[in-house]
């Protein structure tokens, strides 16, 4: 214990841990994709739907935001096969990735829908009226006028969600999917847990780099959308 | 009444308990320019907005170029149809914040009229030139002066070439030079058969541009008639009262001639 | 049934810990977040750089690790401080929940910075100008006009982050704070009936979250006054 | 099924059983450098699998909670997480009669505190334990019986033994409890200034099964008995723990019953 | 030049490459009402905004009531001080969206002038009554018509009782009746010694209200003088050109007398 950090160990553990990056990234991307699509639908239900749709969307959002993600993961991984087998579907052999991304995507959708709703709220109603007065349909008005203006507000919050999902993906290890943290824990346990610090340092470093990429990308998008509104010269 | 281009029947509108429009009936012929005058808060903007279904009237029907919509059970499709027969110039301009001035005026052409981008751009630049904004084509609305934004709003509506254009105080931010130009423009457009309803506060502008002036007060049409008649010889007390101020003012300020 | 009730009561008994963790983390996080957001909006030279660095570091670090760092790191610092100043600071007297709150607050502050910044920037510049024109200081303008309007935009995101914090607080168990998740694990170990325990704890979390959601949407409705949105 | 006289055929038609098993607790189950799941539990399961032509085991790596939820949901057939046996647990799950391992928890303290040997020496001192570990109940049990001089228990959700040993070394806590075999292995790996005290308890370690799966229970019982008698288990124990667990157990309890 | 209340020296301002103010020098005496006229886009709004430091000038200095601020190295405290000596009425009103009309006008009193809420409320209601908005005191800005918002903006500025009030087209959304009232109000305030700079497009209004008219074009002050002089007998070609439109228009429209 003379040395706090065992650099040689870190050197050898590093390549093993970064092996898991693709798993983490694929899981992240699929969850975000599902979350965005479903989140968008939820937002539309909540701001444009009738009473029943608002209630449905609100209940869904409340449940997904209100229950622990690990429970949602278990529900999907253990609950859905039983449910689906009633309908004669056998999903036992499906890859864990499918269950994991569905679970995270469903949960993520609730958060994303609220982020989108807030962005939508930030656009003055006058902009919609201007679009309508030109004769645009609601969809055209949304796509060409409202959406581009929501993005400036939405991007920072969507980035938040992305980073949070990135970190949440480590839950997939409970069902045996070897993501970054999972790989780190396995590497650490192979050393009898004696190299915890080193291994977590590597994982943190990888997260750090991934987050920097996400942040840079989001910064780029935000500036792009701002420039598109003449807010940046 | 051969062939009215715009016909409003019994339009009512209330905000909460406040009755803002109390049964408006108005018929406008093709190519006619009708000016609505009236004190602040009398419901002029609200009336234009209900015609464009930006505000849904509580009662009444709207007919534009033979196409009638009952306000209360208007279907989405009907509303869209109606809106495409009309265009609106807003009191506060309402330009698309995420688009340049050129894109603002082209937008309707490309999206609604499905005109090719190249052609739309050419037309857009033409109309911007006409309102003196050629050099601002690539600026965003938040980089324009008030008068420039207002002109862009006018250009956007004109370019759509609709049956009816609704102007809500189109000259409020314009200096007299430009008012003159807008006047000329509106007259020219009227000659091509486009119908126009103009809300304005500038009596002299009204006098120049209108075929007919409608005087509104407190949610009602008080009286209407050709400008020579209504402005000089109004029948109703309320109209007289409104106009007395103007003439007295004008009298006292006219030391230019 | 008895099992259900017993466990429910046991977990409920530590619900205040969970709520305390989430609420304090959000309050401290929002304070830091507001500061960082304003520094970023005004691009204050130099400290803007520092803030960016802070945000990048905390954002890139999983809460779990923040928790470890706070739990093991702060005592180290205090310890050497105590030695160098020969003050009598006892680290062991500090309850672990303190470290958990620090870690959670830092974590939330990053996301709150973004949420607050985007909301403030969505308020038209004319509003700030109007404040200035009546002679308000920037601080007064933010307090009376800008922030109240920005809150409407921020609330859905703040509520996202708050509800996230309620559940994120379960990580405090890593530094031996007994909150709801930790308690359910303690309860589950005797019977191994994780399924039931998870149902119980989920219902409880949901209940807590529903309560806060209700508060947030009430605030949102209140603030919507005077707002004209699509 | 026909009688298994054709070996290949029965291999192919062998029923697949899914085993839910952990992967981060060495030396029982963990992944080696090449990413392979290895450990005492894994080897025992493989030996059982070899004995049973009618079954093929498949491992599903899950954490503790997930394993138990999976078993209840019917996603796995056998759960292997170094389970101890309590009456309460037996209400929900089915335990085989035969343990495949035995647990010998020992007290670990700082090298210099050799006066600390049993839990009764720890009154007033601080010990850290995961609440999910069965060792936690030793501490709470002790405190229930000695309310006048309780152990100060720190609950930590995840505490690898190595970390606990670090905490003991640095004096942050005064002691912890670990399995003898785990401690032996670790003491070789790290050279932390720690020592082992007395054996605190000895108990059987079991698989657990779905409540109504008595058929599998019988098969497993027989296989485990056979492996113990043939000395395979003793061999594996030496290999992974550096001691013969069952022999130590006999010494500690004076008999071989696991009731 | 006894005791100028507002003095602008060599104010320059550019947006990107566009030079919007090209060295403005202007002195306004206490109690004087100066009207700025000029074509759209000539920099009038920008000038008012730089005086209030909403836009920071690139060069020059501003003196208000003996207090001088160099634009380039203005400290926070100076800017605040300057702003408290002035008030502004915006071209697009800029009411606080989260506050009712009454709260809008009270805000400055309570926060900046530290006046007790009770008293501020009484004063607020008084001034709202003066501009005809007493019944809208508890409405939010988005529930008001254009003219109502504009009047609320004027009320907010007046109530602050500053040394200098800057009006940016205060009558653009007002009907002639109300224009007359604003005129009276401004004159009354001027008598109490408050200095005013008014940007407007309404020449008749300018003529009535101004002690002096400043004609701006293209970022420069072209000429200035009393209204009788500048409007009737301008010296510069550019001024003549600007005014010719108006007089010709007026001439042709004056069939009321
Ligand atoms: N934020 C900005 N970015 C770029 N250009 C701007 C900006 N604000 C104003 N301008 C430009 O500066 C010029 C002067 O604008 P200003 O608003 O001062 O004009 P104005 O005299 O008030 O005109 P109007 O009578 O139409 O209101 C205009 O050409 C305008 O396009
Ligand atoms: N969204 C709303 N909610 C409540 N009241 C409203 C709303 N919009 C308008 N009003 C009220 O309706 C009345 C008519 O407003 P409108 O905008 O039609 O007046 P206007 O004739 O256009 O006046 P101006 O000349 O001042 O623009 C006003 O008293 C206004 O306060
Ligand atoms: Mg209006
Ligand atoms: Mg202007």
Image (tube, coloured by chain):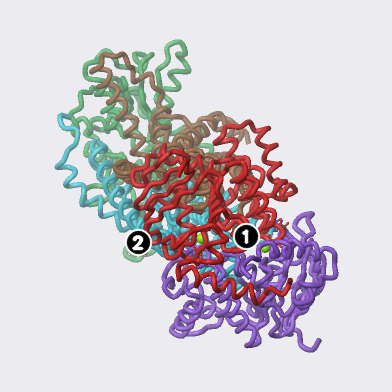
Chain colours: A cyan, B purple, C brown, D green, E red
Disc 2 under 8 Å from ligand 1? The reply is yes
Residue sitting nearer the eye, C188 or D207: C188
User: Which residue is drawn at the image coordinates 61% and 32% (left, top)?
Assistant: E115
Q: Quadrant of the N terminus of chain E?
A: top left
* x, y percent for residue A50: 68, 61
Residue to which mark 2 is pinned:
E16
Image depth: mark 1 or mark 2 in front: 1
Q: CA distance from mark 1 to mark 2?
A: 34 Å
Mark linked to residue E205: 1
User: Which residue is drawn at the image coordinates 69% and 85% (left, top)?
Assistant: B31
Q: Chain of mark 2?
A: E
**Badge 2 density bin: few <14, some 14–19, many ≥20, Cα 10 Å:** few
Q: Are marks 1 and 2 on the same chain?
A: yes
Mark linked to residue A183: none
Residue E228 against residue E67 in the figure, above or below: below
* x, y percent for residue B70: 77, 74
Residue E4 against residue E94 in the figure, above or below: above
Left or right: A204 as drawn, with respect to E150: left
């Amino acid at each position: 214990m003379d040395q706090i950090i065992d650099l040689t160990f870190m050197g050898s553990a590093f390549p093993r841990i970064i092996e898991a990056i693709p798993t983490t990234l694929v899981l992240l991307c699929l969850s975000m994709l599902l979350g965005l699509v479903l989140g968008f639908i939820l937002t539309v239900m909540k701001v444009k739907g009738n009473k029943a749709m608002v209630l449905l969307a609100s209940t869904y959002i409340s449940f997904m935001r209100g229950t622990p993600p690990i429970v949602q993961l278990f529900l999907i991984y253990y609950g859905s096969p039983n449910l689906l087998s009633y309908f004669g579907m056998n999903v036992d052999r499906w890859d864990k990735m499918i269950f994991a991304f569905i679970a995270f995507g469903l949960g993520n959708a609730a958060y994303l829908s609220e982020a989108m709703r807030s962005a939508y709220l930030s656009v003055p109603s006058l902009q919609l009226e201007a679009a309508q007065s030109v004769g645009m349909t609601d969809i055209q008005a949304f796509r060409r006028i409202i959406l581009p203006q929501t993005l400036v507000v939405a991007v920072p919050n969507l980035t938040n969600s992305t980073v949070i999902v990135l970190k949440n993906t480590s839950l997939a290890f409970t069902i045996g999917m070897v993501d970054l943290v999972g790989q780190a824990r396995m590497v650490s346990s192979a050393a009898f847990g004696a190299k915890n610090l080193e291994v977590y340092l590597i994982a943190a470093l990888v997260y750090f780099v991934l987050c920097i990429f996400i942040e840079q990308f989001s910064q780029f998008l935000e500036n792009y959308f701002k420039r598109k509104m003449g807010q940046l010269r | 009444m051969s062939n009215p281009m715009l016909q409003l029947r019994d339009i009512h509108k209330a905000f909460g308990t406040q009755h803002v429009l109390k049964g408006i009936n108005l018929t406008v012929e093709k190519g006619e320019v009708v000016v609505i005058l009236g004190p602040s808060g009398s419901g002029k903007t609200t009336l234009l907005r209900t015609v464009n279904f930006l505000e849904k009237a509580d009662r009444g029907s709207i007919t534009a170029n033979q196409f009638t919509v009952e306000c209360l059970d208007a279907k989405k499709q009907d509303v869209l149809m109606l809106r495409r027969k009309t265009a609106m110039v807003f009191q506060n301009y309402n330009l698309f914040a995420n688009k340049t001035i050129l894109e603002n005026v082209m937008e309707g052409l490309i999206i609604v009229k499905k005109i090719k981008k190249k052609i739309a751009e050419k037309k857009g630049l033409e109309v911007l030139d006409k309102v003196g904004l050629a050099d601002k084509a690539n600026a965003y609305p938040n980089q324009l002066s008030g008068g420039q934004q207002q002109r862009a709003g006018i250009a956007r509506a004109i370019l759509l070439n609709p049956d009816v254009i609704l102007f809500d105080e189109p000259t409020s931010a314009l200096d007299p030079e430009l008012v003159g130009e807008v006047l000329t423009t509106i007259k020219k457009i009227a000659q091509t058969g486009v119908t126009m309803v103009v809300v304005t506060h500038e009596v002299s502008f009204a006098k120049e541009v209108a075929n007919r002036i409608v005087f509104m007060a407190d949610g009602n049409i008080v009286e209407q008639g050709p400008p020579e008649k209504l402005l000089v010889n109004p029948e109703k007390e309320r109209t007289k009262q409104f106009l007395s101020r103007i003439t007295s003012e004008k009298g006292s300020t006219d030391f230019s001639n | 049934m008895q099992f259900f009730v017993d466990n429910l009561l046991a977990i409920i008994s530590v619900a205040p810990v969970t709520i305390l963790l989430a609420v304090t983390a959000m309050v401290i996080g929002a304070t830091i977040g507001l500061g960082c957001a304003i520094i970023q909006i005004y691009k204050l030279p130099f400290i803007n750089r520092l803030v960016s660095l802070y945000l990048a570091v905390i954002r890139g670090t999983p809460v779990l690790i923040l928790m470890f760092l706070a739990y093991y790191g702060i005592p180290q610092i205090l310890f050497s401080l105590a030695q160098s100043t020969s003050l009598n600071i006892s680290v062991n007297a500090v309850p672990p929940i303190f470290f958990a709150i620090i870690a959670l607050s830092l974590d939330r502050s990053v996301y709150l910075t973004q949420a607050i910044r985007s909301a403030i920037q969505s308020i038209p510049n004319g509003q700030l100008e109007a404040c200035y024109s009546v002679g308000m200081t920037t601080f007064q303008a933010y307090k009376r006009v800008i922030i109240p309007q920005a809150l409407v935009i921020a609330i859905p995101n703040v509520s996202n982050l708050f509800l996230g914090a309620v559940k994120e607080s379960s990580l405090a168990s890593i530094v031996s704070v007994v909150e709801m998740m930790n308690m359910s694990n303690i309860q589950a170990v005797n019977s191994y009936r994780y399924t039931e325990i998870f149902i119980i704890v989920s219902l409880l979390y949901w209940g807590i979250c529903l309560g806060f959601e209700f508060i947030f949407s009430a605030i949102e409705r209140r603030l919507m006054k005077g707002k004209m949105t699509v | 099924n026909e009688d298994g006289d054709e070996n290949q055929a029965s291999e192919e038609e062998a029923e697949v059983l899914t085993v839910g098993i952990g992967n981060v607790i060495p030396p029982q189950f963990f992944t080696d450098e090449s990413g392979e799941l290895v450990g005492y539990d894994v080897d025992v399961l493989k030996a059982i699998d070899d004995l049973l032509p009618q079954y093929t085991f498949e491992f599903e790596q899950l954490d503790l909670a997930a394993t138990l939820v999976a078993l209840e949901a019917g996603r796995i057939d056998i759960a292997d997480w170094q389970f101890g046996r309590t009456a309460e647990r037996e209400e929900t799950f089915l335990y085989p009669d035969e343990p495949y391992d035995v647990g010998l928890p020992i007290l670990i303290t700082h090298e210099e505190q050799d006066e600390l040997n049993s839990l009764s020496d720890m009154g007033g001192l601080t010990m850290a334990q995961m609440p999910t570990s069965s060792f936690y109940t030793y501490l709470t049990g002790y405190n229930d019986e000695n309310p006048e001089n309780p152990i100060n228990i720190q609950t930590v959700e995840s505490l690898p033994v190595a970390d606990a040993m670090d905490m003991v070394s640095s004096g942050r806590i005064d002691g912890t409890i670990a399995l003898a075999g785990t401690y032996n292995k670790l003491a070789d790996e790290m050279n932390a200034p720690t020592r082992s005290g007395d054996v605190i308890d000895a108990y059987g370690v079991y698989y657990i099964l779905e409540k109504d799966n008595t058929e599998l229970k019988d098969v497993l019982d027989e296989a485990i008995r056979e492996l113990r008698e043939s000395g395979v288990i003793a061999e594996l124990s030496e290999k992974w723990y550096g001691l013969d667990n069952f022999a130590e157990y006999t010494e500690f309890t004076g008999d071989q019953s696991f009731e």
